[in-house]
Image (cartoon, grey):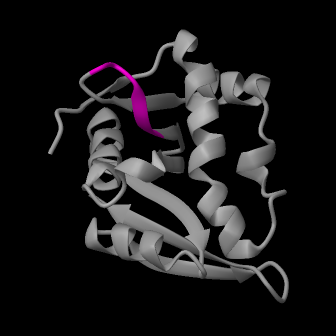
Amino acid sequence: MSLVEIRTADREDLEEILALQYLAYQSEAELFGNKDIPPLKQTLDEVRTEFEEGVILKMTDEEGAIIGSVRAKEKDGTVYIGKLMVDPGQRRKGYGRRLLSGIEKHYPGKRYELFTSTRSRDNIRLYESSGYRIFDQKKIDEELEFVYMEKMT
C-alpha cells in the first residue's frame, strides 16, 4: 500500500479536486446512464462556496497528487458529508473509509449524515461497514432512489 496523507485542502487545491471529481464521478454517471449528474456539472465557483461553508479534506499520494477528497459542513450538531471520491485507479484500498474517518476526526462527537443512491451498492457497503445505518429513503423518480444514512457517536 502506498503512503498517503489526509489534510485539510487549501483554496489552491480546489481546481485539482474538481478535476478529480469529474474523473471519479464517471462511474456514477455510467450507473445512471446519464452524464448530466450534478457532480459532473459543478463549477469551480460552487466548490469554492463549499470550501468557505465547511471543510474539504484531500488525500495525497507520495508525490503530492490528490487521489481522494471528501467535503462536509456542520449544522445544528449534524455533519453533512458529501462528495466522497477516490481516483478510480486507487479504489479498493480503503481510502474511502480513511476519508470518512478523517471527517469524523475533524468534527468529533457529532451525528454524521450522508446520502447515496440505491444503485450505488458499493457505497452503501462502505458506509455500513464504517458504522453508518440507513434511516430514510426517498424515491426521486422511477429511476432514482436516495438512501440517507447516519452515524451517531
Residue at position x 49%, y 48% in the image: 85
140 with respect to 127 (left or right): right
Q: Position of residue 89 (x, y in %)?
A: 41, 50
Residue at position x 48%, y 79% in the image: 121
- Decide: is 55 above or below 119: above
- Decide: is 134 above or below 130: below
Looking at this view, is 76 or 122 the one in front? 122
Q: Position of residue 97 (x, y in %)?
A: 29, 55
Q: Position of residue 84 (x, y in %)?
A: 49, 49
Residue at position x 62%, y 53% in the image: 25
- Decide: is 91 above or below 103: below
109 with respect to 120 (left or right): left
27 with respect to 101 (left or right): right
Range covered by the magenta-colored residues: 63-69
Q: Quadrant of the N terminus?
A: top left
The furthest residue to the top: 12
Q: Is residue 89 magenta?
A: no
Residue at position x 77%, y 39% in the image: 42
Residue 85 in sight: yes
Q: Is residue 67 magenta?
A: yes
Q: Quadrant of residue 153?
A: bottom left
- Decide: is 16 above or below 71: above
